Amino acid sequence: MATRKKHHRFVTKAWVGAVVAMMILIPSFIDRIILCSNQLPLPEKQITNGHQNQIFKNATRDQDLHDIVRQQTKRMSPNGLILHAISIGNPRSASTLQFNAVCVSLFLHILNFAPALANNTSCIFVGGLKKFKKKEKQRSKSNPQVIKMHFKPNCTEVLNDTWLFSTARDLSDGREEKSWLIDHCGTQERIGYIQDLETLSEIGLDGILRKYGDVFSLEPHMMDAMIEYFDIWDKLRVCCGRQMSKYWRNELLPSNSTLKVTTMKNHSLCPHLNIDDVEERFMETKLYRLIHRHDKLRRMNRPSLLDGDLNGQYCSDYNNKVKTQGIGFNEGRKI
């Protein structure tokens, strides 16, 4: 009788353990299905004869996905598992682009090599040295995180496994930045990438994103999703929200605004965009939908961390406030 009870307790514990494991791993597996599939299966009510072949192909691809994912998670990244990163850069040096690119790259890296940690991935901005020290003391060594800052860190306060990224004005400034990081932080192996505006202008956004993809060992389908995502995000970043281009904001400001500069040139791109259409297309990207599923990362889907959540007309509403209320940089709608 006692043996039978012990066996029953053992089986019960085994089932509980299996259920807990599934609860942890299934969300990450679903995330990768969203990312890998070129087209999500259509609802049954939309299925027609014309769609049957495509749906069959999608189903076949998703059926094979489990084996692909299993092979990827067994293979170690050339740079090892990256859990922590810091993005350093002065304002208006494309530091937000770098922060977002590092954040999304780290998330995809974790999703690929340590999917059980994906739900714990976070990306934050730290405004001062005291706050940074506090955050570093509180930071879990096992939870993936990216920190953005506009100042040089005290490297004695940085976790030893942290990768460092920075921005610079040009190649020369970038070399100086790298030398400073090596001299003060005592590492060259964990310097991820120094992003400079000169190189960004030469190789474009796609080229810069591939630099981050190389550091984080992202798969080709992940890079495709990154490029699609940031190509549209970059337009929103420039033409929408609290940190939009100063030229576009100036163009939108009412003529009687004290902030308006009459001699400033107009923006070449923003006036020609249907900003609501751009916002909706961004929200439809696979990577946007993937990130939106994770509460700790959802703010990365905004034009800036200070903006509100997108809803299909957030940008046109904000831009209209600039026109009618004359709101300036970092002003307007609160989070």
Image: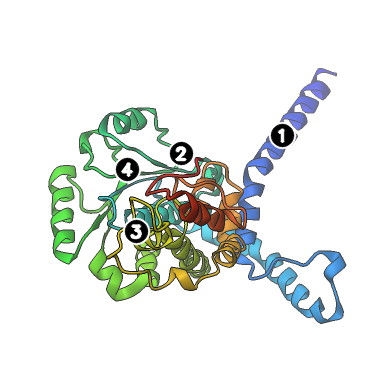
Q: CA distance from mark 1 to mark 2?
A: 27 Å
In x, y percent, where is residue 214?
37, 64
Label whose residue precedes the other's in the sequence (2 or 4): 2
Q: Nearer the viewer, mark 4 or mark 1?
A: 4
Q: CA distance from mark 3 to mark 4?
A: 38 Å
Q: Nearer the viewer, mark 3 or mark 4?
A: 3
Label whose residue precedes the other's in the sequence (3 or 2): 2
Dot 4 alpha-carbon crowd within 10 angstroms: few under 14, some 14 to 19, many 20 or more: few
Q: Which mark is residue 161?
A: 4
The residue at which mark 1 appears reads as 14
* Residue 299 against residue 285 in the figure, above or below: above
Q: CA distance from mark 2 to mark 4?
A: 12 Å
In x, y percent, where is residue 137?
34, 28
Dot 1 alpha-carbon crowd within 10 angstroms: few under 14, some 14 to 19, many 20 or more: few
Mark 2 and 4 residues: CB-CB less than 8 Å, in contact? no
Closer to the camera, 305 or 25? 305
In the rendered structure, the answer to whether residue 234 lies left or right of residue 162 reads right
Dot 3: what SS? helix
The residue at which mark 3 appears reads as 246
Q: CA distance from mark 3 to mark 2?
A: 37 Å
Closer to the camera, 6 or 142? 142
Q: CA distance from mark 4 to mark 1?
A: 35 Å
Label whose residue precedes the other's in the sequence (1 or 3): 1
Label whose residue precedes the other's in the sequence (1 or 2): 1
In the rendered structure, the answer to whether residue 171 lies left or right of residue 149 reads left
Dot 4: what SS? loop
